[in-house]
Amino acid sequence: MNKNVLRNLSYGVYVVSTKCDNRPTGCIANSVMQVTHDTIALSINHDNYTNKCIKEHKKFAISILGVDVNDNIIPIFGFQSGRDVDKFKGIETSTIEGIEVLKDSTGYIICELQNQMETETHTIFLGKIIDCEVCKEEIPMTYRYYHQVKKGTSPKAAPTFIENTPAKTENSIRYKCTICGYIYEGDISKEPDDYVCPVCKKPKSVFAKI
Ligand code: FE
């Protein structure tokens, strides 16, 4: 069995958002697809806080990320838990049907939870589209683009996670957290020794020049 063939399936990169205890929360997903004219299927790992929150709130939004999305949106939403932090702090959003969607996206889809199914690791949610809009004329990011061009990494909870080592790029003024992908602009050696990645809280030593 060669799981590399699974990379030939097409995926986008999305921020899935919902609400929990009266505050917004969300995570990165790539397993999102339109399965009928008005139905979206979405898979979220059981360990993700967003999973529990969608089950409770029964409504979710998909913000479709574009190729020029801010580099730190994916680390912020993909590599920390909404249990611990408000991921939406400092993020520009619009509130649609009571859910926060990202302004920095090509558009959004709002769904009402219709059904769900459990697998060993993930819940597959089916949502009926109740609203959707184009926000920006920008090329939507594919999962392949994220890995090959953006040199992105995936958290182990991602359904399409495959162990790999991101390739290096030529750029000498930025550092990248090798754990979560957070981009540090400038010379990180000027930070104090106890500097930690603002997203995954790992030490300065995990940053690599890109
Ligand atoms: Fe990090």
Image (tube, rainbow, N blue to C red):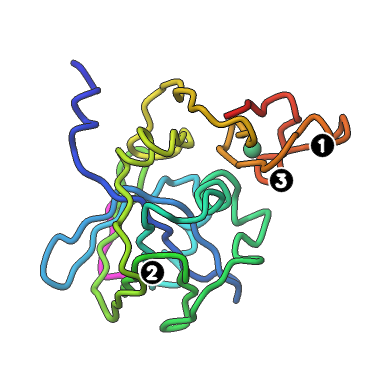
| Left or right of 35, for residue 122 | right
Do tag 1 and tag 2 residues touch (Cβ < 8 Å)? Answer: no
Magenta stretch, residue numbers: 113-117
Query: How many dots with numbers?
Result: 3
Please give the residue where the numbered disc 2 appears in the rendered image: 61
- Sooner in the amino-acid sequence: mark 1 or mark 2: 2
Q: Element type at marker 2?
A: strand
For marks 1 and 2, give the one nearer the viewer: 1
Q: Residue at x 74, y 34 (%)?
A: 187
The foreground one among 149 and 8 is 149
Residue 133 lies within the magenta run: no
- Residue 156 at what x, y percent from top left? 46, 33
Determine whether the beta carbon of the residue marked 3 sits less than 8 angstroms from the nearest atom of ligand 1. Answer: yes
Q: Is residue 168 above or below residue 71?
A: above
How far apart are labels 1 and 3 at the CA level?
A: 9 Å
Task: Tell me the number on the disc at residue 198.
Answer: 3
Do tag 1 and tag 3 residues touch (Cβ < 8 Å)? Answer: no
How far apart are labels 2 and 3 at the CA level?
A: 26 Å
Determine whether the beta carbon of the residue marked 2 sits less than 8 angstroms from the nearest atom of ligand 1. Answer: no
Q: Amino acid at mark 1?
A: Tyr
Determine whether the beta carbon of the residue marked 1 sits less than 8 angstroms from the nearest atom of ligand 1. Answer: no
Q: Amino acid at mark 3?
A: Pro
Q: Element type at marker 3?
A: loop
- Residue 209 at what x, y percent from top left? 62, 27
The foreground one among 159 and 178 is 178
Q: Residue at x 38, y 35 (%)?
A: 147
User: Picture quarter containing residue 174?
Assistant: top right
